[in-house]
Amino acid sequence: MDKDWSTVTASISLIIAVISAWIAYDTFHHQALAQKPQIVIQPNFVDRSGLILLSIMNHGENPAYNITIKWHNPIINSKDEIFSFSNGSKKYDILVLSKNEKVSTLVDGLTSFYNKYKDADLEYSGVITYTEDLKSRRKNHQNFNLSLTSYKRLVNETDSGITHNKLQSIPDHLASLQKEIHSLRKELLTIK
């Protein structure tokens, strides 16, 4: 009977040891992942009113280097230009992106883009490739999806913002008109 209890105790101890080892490995693995760069591409309508920007940001703890973005279906603006984070003259789009650093690039004007693609499905995807060291040859690949479809409603909301900004410039224009009228009035009085 003692042998049976010894076997049961040993089995339970082995199961506990395996579970503990798995938990330790899983914790270590998640900590290692948290240290890696976490690159995100997202639309940005806040930084520049009336424009569509795409922002790429690193939410990870460590910097990402030699970042390239390969689009499966690229964004084409209202002038039929293909969007890119760089001008294509280098092997990478962005050299380095540190922790919480963001780079934004102009896609198009909000109204012109959505007027051209008002009935289109604006779903995009691709692969972000980066290295964890500037001189490293080992590349990490991360898939991404991006949708601009749900932002179509911003055209109307932004139009009111643009109108508001233009209305704010009216007093300056009125002041310049008043000066011009005043100078014309002086000229007319000197002619008489």
Image (cartoon, rainbow, N blue to C red):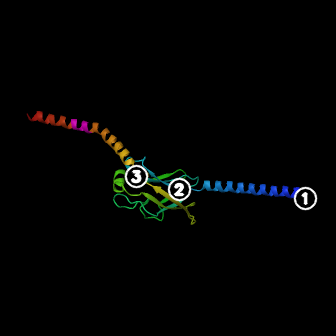
The residue that mark 2 highlights is: 39
Question: Looking at this rendering, what residue extends furthest in the left direction?
Answer: 192
Which residue is rendered at x = 82% and y = 58% of the image? 11
> Disc 1 to disc 3, how far (Cα)?
74 Å
At 41% from the left and 61% from the top, the residue drawn is 87
Q: Residue at x 74, y 55 (%)?
A: 19
Residue 185 vs residue 116: left or right? left
Q: Earlier in the sequence, mark 1 or mark 3?
A: 1
Q: Which residues are magenta?
A: 173-178
The majority secondary structure of the magenta stretch comes to: helix
What residue is shown at x 45% (from left), y 59% (from top)? 124
Residue mark closest to the camera, 1 vs 2: 1
Residue highlighted by disc 3: 52
Residue type at numbered disc 1: Lys
Indicate the position of residue 89 as horizontal and vertical percent values.
43, 64
Tell me which label, 1 or 2, sits earlier in the chain: 1
> Pointers 1 and 2 in contact (CB under 8 A)?
no
Quadrant occupied by the N terminus: bottom right
Residue nearest the observer in this picture, 11 or 87? 11
